[in-house]
Amino acid sequence: MKKIALLFILPLFLVSCGGEETKEKELENIDVEKNPLGALMKMGKNMAENAEKMEEKMKNRKDAKAIHYEELLKYLPESIEGYQINGEPKGASMDMQGMSYSSAEIEFKNKDGNRIDITLLDYNAAYNMYTMATTMWASGFKIDTSEEFAQSISFGDNINGWESFKKKSYRANIALGIGDRFLLTIDGDNQEGTEALKEIIKSMDIDGLAGLE
């Protein structure tokens, strides 16, 4: 636990120790694949920037509401080649003082019993929850071990996320932050990588989601 905490504290300390323009440029030019410490520094910079952005967003979204789950369900894919919808799509909306969010989810299953689960969350009035989930994605962080490959990914302006593939269990996952508001997660078993999940994302109207106010 102490090691995990240190990983998150270290980049914040490193960034706070030097805010000069030259160091800003150095951070931008860091090769995160060859420089793990530099990747942590870059992640720390993103965390600090996101904290400021979160504070401003919370001011602007003080009275915002998440869209109802029935509307959110319309953005989920209706079909996936080789799969059938397994059960009914599900959704939920939650409103309480100072917080509002909604969720929609659907599950697909093929003839061999392999599943693809898709969940879409609207954090329009729960921005702190969104930021906690997406802090490191814009850092360019990458992991490659004998068991897992994972890295930051981007599908366009303000659409960034994280892809991971478990090499031994063949389980793939993509989590995507859309428009500083929506969180899309796609999880599939018996995959050869994340490419099939990316094709599903491309079939969805994520640009439309990113444009919602």
Image: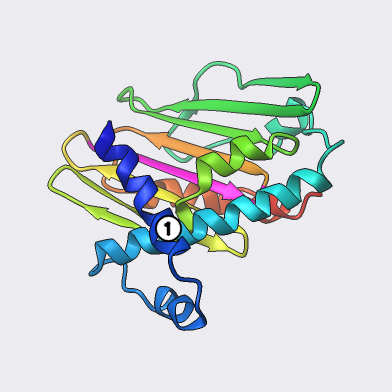
The residue at the point 51 percent across, 53 percent down is 47
Task: Return the residue found at the far left.
Answer: 146
Task: Return the residue found at the far right.
Answer: 63
Q: Is residue 37 left or right of residue 103?
A: left
Q: Which of 126 and 213 lies nearest the eye of the viewer?
A: 126
Q: Is residue 188 above or below residue 20?
A: above
Q: How is the image coloured?
A: rainbow
Give the quarter of the figure containing the N terminus: top left
Q: Is residue 80 above or below residue 40?
A: above
Task: Return the residue found at the far bottom.
Answer: 22
Q: Is residue 176 magenta?
A: yes
Residue position marked by numbered label 1 in the rendering: 43
User: Which amino acid type is marked by label 1?
Assistant: Met
Q: Residue 62 in the image: x percent, y percent?
A: 83, 38
Q: Is residue 5 left or right of residue 17?
A: left
Q: Residue 171 in the image: x percent, y percent?
A: 29, 36
Q: Is residue 179 visible?
A: no
Q: Is residue 176 above or below residue 95?
A: below
Q: Is residue 64 left or right of residue 55?
A: right
Residues rendered magenta in the picture: 170-180
The residue at the point 41 percent across, 73 percent down is 27
Q: Which of 158 and 105 lies nearest the eye of the viewer?
A: 158
Q: Secondary structure at mark 1?
A: helix
The residue at the point 55 percent across, 26 percent down is 106
Q: Residue 61 in the image: x percent, y percent?
A: 81, 43
